[in-house]
Amino acid sequence: MNEIEQALLGMAASPWIYAALFLLVIADAFLVLLPSETLVVALGALAATGGEPSLLLLVPVAAVGALVGDSLCYLIGRRIGIDRWAWQRRGRIAAALSRARATVLTRPAVLIFTARYVPYARIAVNLSAGAAGLPARRFLPLAAFAGTAWAIYNVSVGALFGTALPGSPVLAIALSVAVAIVLGIAVDLVAQRLAARRDPTQRDPSSPS
């Protein structure tokens, strides 16, 4: 076993890994650049190759972190709105907010569940749900279900490759993260196509003007 593999397995065995995962998933509800999905997938692969961290703990920690982060984002939308800060009025966030605001009250379940897998859409939907006045008693169960499904999915992707490559944690992480990224891009593209079909006038926000 090389030094990189030893370092990875040592990190995975640390009890602090769960706190780090929890905080990163929460932060990812606001900061798209933080790769919480990547960490969840990587830890799932490590859990399957080396037995640490615990798969039984990874899922609930990631799921609760997702719920807390999404709920905080919802509260920001409810208390502050969706157009007070500059980052809410430009780029992909602004375009996603415009789409989400129009439909979040009529299709909250579909939006909250699918948006969990698309970073920009996730922020937009949660902010819009709060700003539009979607009741917390509806938002919280949907966010909890979406976060749990998201956690199970990402941990499972990592664990699948970890199980297939038990003696190669680095390779298992690399392959599982690559597959997760490709699947995430595919989900994003499908979501954009579906949104365009429902509203033919809506352009892809990432396309040039």
Image (cartoon, rainbow, N blue to C red):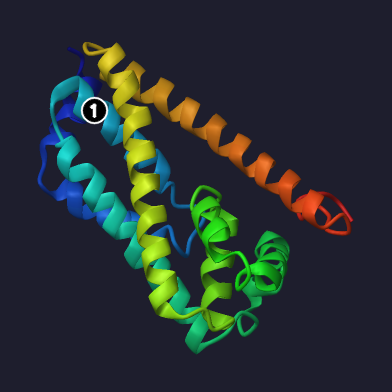
Horizontal side of 142 relative to 151 (left or right) equals: right
Where does the image place residue 21, in percent across and percent down from the top left?
Answer: 27, 50
Q: Splitting the image into 4 quarters, where does residue 175 fall? A: top left
> In the image, what residue occupies the spot 26% across and 17% down?
163
> In the image, what residue occupies the spot 86% across and 51% down?
208
Amino acid bearing label 1: Leu
Where does the image place residue 19, in percent across and percent down from the top left?
Answer: 19, 55
Task: Quarter of the image for the C terminus: give it.
Answer: bottom right
Q: In the rendered view, tell whether residue 160 sits above or below residue 94.
A: above
Q: In the rendered view, tell whether residue 12 sits above or below residue 82.
A: above
> In the image, what residue occupies the spot 38% across and 38% down?
153
Q: Helix or strand or loop: what does disc 1 sit on?
A: helix
Q: In the rendered view, tell whether residue 95 sits above or below residue 10.
A: below
Q: Which residue is mark 1?
A: 46
> In the image, what residue occupies the spot 33% across and 50% down?
148
Horizontal side of 150 relative to 115 (left or right) equals: left
Task: Quarter of the image for the N terminus: give it.
Answer: top left
Where does the image place residue 74, in percent across and percent down from the top left?
Answer: 46, 75
Along the viewing direction, whichever of 181 and 20 lies nearer the viewer: 181
Determine crowd level at label 1: few under 14, some 14-19, many 20+ residues with C-alpha closer than 10 A.
many
Q: Splitting the image into 4 quarters, where does residue 52 fall? A: top left
Instruction: Return the residue found at the far bottom.
Output: 79
Along the viewing direction, whichever of 18 and 189 lies nearer the viewer: 189
Q: Splitting the image into 4 quarters, where does residue 103 fall? A: bottom right
Q: In the rendered view, tell whether residue 166 sits above or below residue 158.
A: above
Where does the image place residue 185, in percent across and percent down from the top left?
Answer: 60, 37
Along the viewing direction, whichever of 110 and 156 lies nearer the viewer: 110
Number of marks:
1
